[in-house]
Amino acid sequence: MGKQAAIELKNITKTFGSIIANKDVSLTVNRGEILSILGENGSGKTTLMNMISGIYFPDHGQIFINGQEVVIRSPRDAFDYKIGMIHQHFKLVDVFSAAENIILGLENEGKFNIKQSTSKIKAISEQYGFEIDPDKKVYEMSVSEKQTVEIIKVLYRGADILILDEPTAVLTPQEAQKLFAVLRRMRDDGKSIIIITHKLHEVLSLSDRVVVLRKGEYIGTVETKETNETELTEMMVGKKISLNIDRSEPKNCETRLEVKNVSCVNREGVKMLDSVNFEAKSGEILGIAGIAGSGQRELLESIAGLQKLTEGQILYHNPKTGKTDNLGDKTPLQIRDLGVRLSFVPEDRLGMGLVGNMDIVDNMMLRSYRKGKTMFLERKKPKNLANKIIEGLEVVTPNANTPVRRLSGGNVQKVLVGREIAASPTVLMAAYPVRGLDINSSYLIYNLLNSQKEEGVAVIFVGEDLDVLLELCDRIMVISSGKISGIVDARTATKEELGLLMTKNNGGTTDEQ
Amino acid sequence: MIVAFIQRAVVQGIPLLFGSTGEIITEKTGNLNLGTAGVMYVGGMTGVIGAFLYEQSAETINPVLAVLIPMLSCVLGSLFMGLLYSFLTVTLRANQNVTGLALTTFGVGFGNFFGGSLIKLTGSDTPSITLTQTSNCFKQALPFADKLGWFGDVFLSYSFLAYMAVAIALIASFFFNRTRAGLHLRAVGENPATADAAGISVSKYKYLATCVGSIIAGFGGLYYVMDYACGVWSNDGFGDRGWLAIALVIFAIWKPSLSILGSMIFGGLFIVHNYIPNLSMSMQEIFKMTPYVVTIVVLIFISMRRKRENQPPASLGLSYFREER
């Protein structure tokens, strides 16, 4: 098969203020191939793709489509060149139906006719094997349904070049496999697909070629057939790193946290947790697995005192005094005053963990400002801590005074996890601490959690990558529709076993298997 | 008595209907224009200026021109306010609340300043300008209205601007729900980043909606002077109707068709104290508060029900910048 370049980038450069997001990047995507773009956080993958899809405009460089130089000034231009991007954060209007979202922005379609569009949507769904209800409102949809809408939106516009930004980050293993099947069908149809992902096994099983970026610069392109995980990691990071998690045997296990019969409801009165029972022990990592929105967030918030319980109690066994406290009806501040230290990494990094417009030092102070002796703020210690985290966790930032909002997602996460760990907790809860993180930073975080475990901290880890859960944790608790569907030993359990538990007693409509 | 009450309620409601329809169109693109009160003042005042100049210069009043000139000058005045608001909030991305409040202060001041100047020009003793001739042209009711008894009084006795207000609200409702541009406009207000990624020009929609919305709101001011007040401009006479129009937007849960009914209810609540005999001054003031109380009740109700379709546009009050990180 003769290889035709569908899109070619030459010497693309883009800067945001003093931050260089892309520097002299050149790459080619052929027709009928799946190209993976691999790189650490802040290596400029998403920025690069945003320039192809017209969200950003490059400072320098040229873009060629089918051999012709083009200027993409806006997303509309990108559509005209048949480029469609599926963003990591879905670009959908919640109160619109699937069909309304799909036809959004189209103007050359003649009369406004939802029915006609609906039948076209159905035809596309059948061609590639999607399941979708065009009249369903987006806010009623599961994550994978939303993604389906995004993909159909792009296909509806007749896109030949599809860009997917971390499409599997929020999907269950089964949903991801379904997506890959669809992508392969599109490739065989002659479409070009660019996929940004951190998961090396996905890169290897799905793509034809891999482009590696590092710190905004182009490192190289390799044929997937001729490479392996170690080589790719090395290209990405620039040095060899070990991909193994050293899991030590748990030592001195004592029950630290006892969750008894806990139930709670959300604001709409829907039961989010239903008689949850478990124990967290010091010196071990308890993993929590489950489909997104099964009650993980509510569970962690209950323990942190942010969620009112309707039933049950949470007992904390204080290692220093030997006393037992009930956390169930205390506020987060009371929990602190008791000497109970819970460090909480919320799911929504910026929303609950950090203040985007404040710099790293100020964000450190959010946890320490009450400790000051005078009425004035003490800035020295937080500043030292900020610098320690920047160095220790390799946060990519111009300096400690950069607003957190300006850092890339992974670096924001490092700042947050670093701060929580610095509080030397006795129970450390981390929800998706590696979401969106590249391999290098992910392993950094895993090792941090491991070292906390060795220091006798009871670690609770909510994760989405089952492989990692199995490698990192000592025990894994599976939560499904707010109920505990099983607690397994991570050393002996299998992925399939967890997958089954995740969908157990799930009578809802989100179950597509 | 009831017929008269309904008539007065409608006449009271029409300026609010203009204002709220304009504000809904603006807010649907995410622009919270708190300057509506000012826009309505400016619309009314520029209409008065147009009419005043025409009455002064023409020897005989041509009814068509007497209507067209004030309307045109009202359009220009409110368009200027709309452009000013859009330029500040969309192009310069100034804070919408501050800009809106500034425009309200400006608009009220503009109205009172030129009101005062015109009063001086006429050299009259009363602190008001009277444009009876123009007003008579505006107030032309349907010829057969008074022959149909109560039906004619309730439904057909109003001037053309009143029917225009209802027609605009219905057209806006149709536009939002049944046209492609309406869908795009709502998308801009719900999620500008999504609309942008879909190739919709966010700035264009925000500018257009704000300007069109301002022009419609401006007519509310014009109707107030020419019809409700019988062509008499007195400073501060317009009162807080602009705020009432913004409250009506919430009452109508951002649906222009509902705001037709809502404006009549607000109008009725606004004047009901005149129709209850033996009310003390303090009780009258309490009755005047009812539209605001009703608005708060509606706010509580829609917040409690949390039906997604009834919530304000998701990005209301926020400015949009594509390369924001």
Image (cartoon, helix red, strand yellow):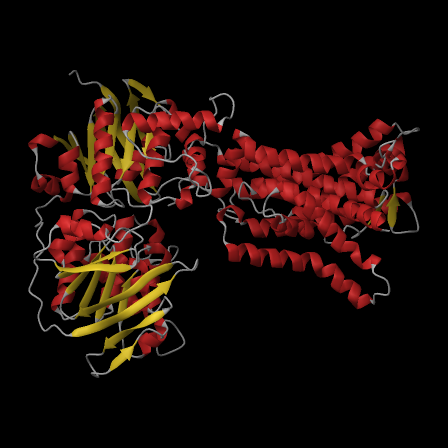
Quarter of the figure with the C terminus of chain A = top left
Which residue of the protein is positioned furthest toward the top in this rendering? A2
Query: Could you tell me which residue is drawn at 64 percent across and 56 percent down?
Result: B295
Q: Left of A223 or right of it: where is A510?
A: right
Q: Left of A32 or right of it: where is B306?
A: right
**Is residue A506 something that shows in the picture?**
yes
Nearer the observer, A27 or B156 = B156
Q: Position of residue A64 (x, y in %)?
A: 29, 22
Nearer the observer, B229 or A139 = A139
Residue A266 found in image quarter: bottom left
> B286 above or below A238?
below
**Is residue B312 something that shows in the picture?**
no
Nearer the observer, B118 or B231 = B231
> A321 above or below B126?
below
Query: Could you tell me which residue is drawn at 49 percent across and 45 percent down?
Result: B319
Q: Left of B206 or right of it: where is A353?
A: left
Q: Position of residue B64 (x, y in %)?
A: 83, 27
Quarter of the figure with the N terminus of chain A = top left
Query: Could you tell me which residue is drawn at 13 percent across and 54 percent down?
Result: A470
